[in-house]
Structures are given as C-alpha cells and as structure tokens.
Image (tube, rainbow, N blue to C red):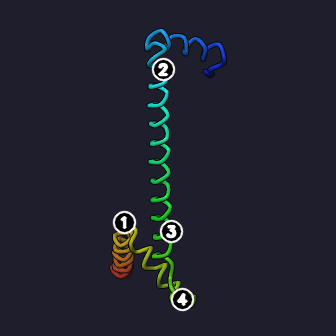
Amino acid sequence: MFSLGVPELLVILVIVLLIFGAKRLPEIGKAFGKSVRELKNATAGDKDEISSWIKDDKEKSSPKSDSKEEKKDFIQEKVEDIPGVKEAKEIKETASKIKAASKFFLKK
C-alpha cells in the first residue's frame, strides 16, 4: 500500500533538518533512540509477565495424578465452572420432569 523508499526518506530528513537545525539533530536522535529502547524493554517485560501467568495457570489447572477417575472429576469441575452450565442442567432436568408429567397426564 504505502512504502518509504530512499527518496522519501531523504525528503523527510531534509524537512527535519530545516525545522530543527543541524545543532539539535543529534539531541533528537539520542532522545528517539532512548524512547525506542525503553519501549522495547517495556514490551519485553510485559511478554515475560504474560508468559509467566500462562505457565502458572497451566500448572494450577492440571491434575496432580494420572488416574482416569481423577481426570474425569477434574474435567467435570472445570465444565461446571463455565457460566451457564448449571442453569442449562437445571433447564434440562425441568424439561425432563415436564415431559414425564405430560406422558402421565396424557395417558388418562
């Protein structure tokens, strides 16, 4: 879409040179370099922090033993923690009760 080639960069450099002057150009470059370095350090710290959260979450969520029964219970607990699952189970039970009651009353 839009790319900067050598001529465009030269035009930008000349405009910056005219606006700020030759004496201030090294100061601006130094400040720009510090800003980029700080930004990289800040984002690297966030990446490390996020990866440690993910690692901690995986360690906490995995079951300690390998028995099938405990894994099944663990998965069942995790499924029940999902919002709406308990309500869906209640609705299903109520529907089955209504179905059973309707069969009883329709026989007579």
Residue at 53% in and 90% down: 69
- Separation of residues labelled 1 and 4 (CA atoms): 27 Å
Q: Earlier in the sequence, mark 2 or mark 1?
A: 2
In the rendered structure, find residue 55 and report the number of the disc placed on it: 3
Q: Which mark is residue 25?
A: 2
Q: Position of residue 4 (x, y in %)?
A: 62, 20
**Residue at the image point whose x is 60% and y is 17% from the top:** 9
Distance in Å between CA atoms under marks 2 and 3: 45 Å
Residue 14's disc number:
none
Residue in the picture at 50% in, 68% down: 55
Q: Nearer the viewer, mark 2 or mark 3?
A: 2
Quadrant where the image shows the N terminus:
top right
Question: Residue flagged by tag 4: what amino acid is it?
Answer: Ser
Displayed quadrant of residue 2: top right
Say the numbered circle drawn on residue 65.
4
The answer for how far apart the CA atoms under marks 3 and 4 are is 18 Å
> Mark 2 or mark 3, which has the lower sequence index?
2
Sequence-earlier tag: 3 or 4: 3
Position of residue 31 measured from the top left corner of the image (x, y, whole percent):
44, 31
Q: Position of residue 63 (x, y in %)?
A: 50, 82
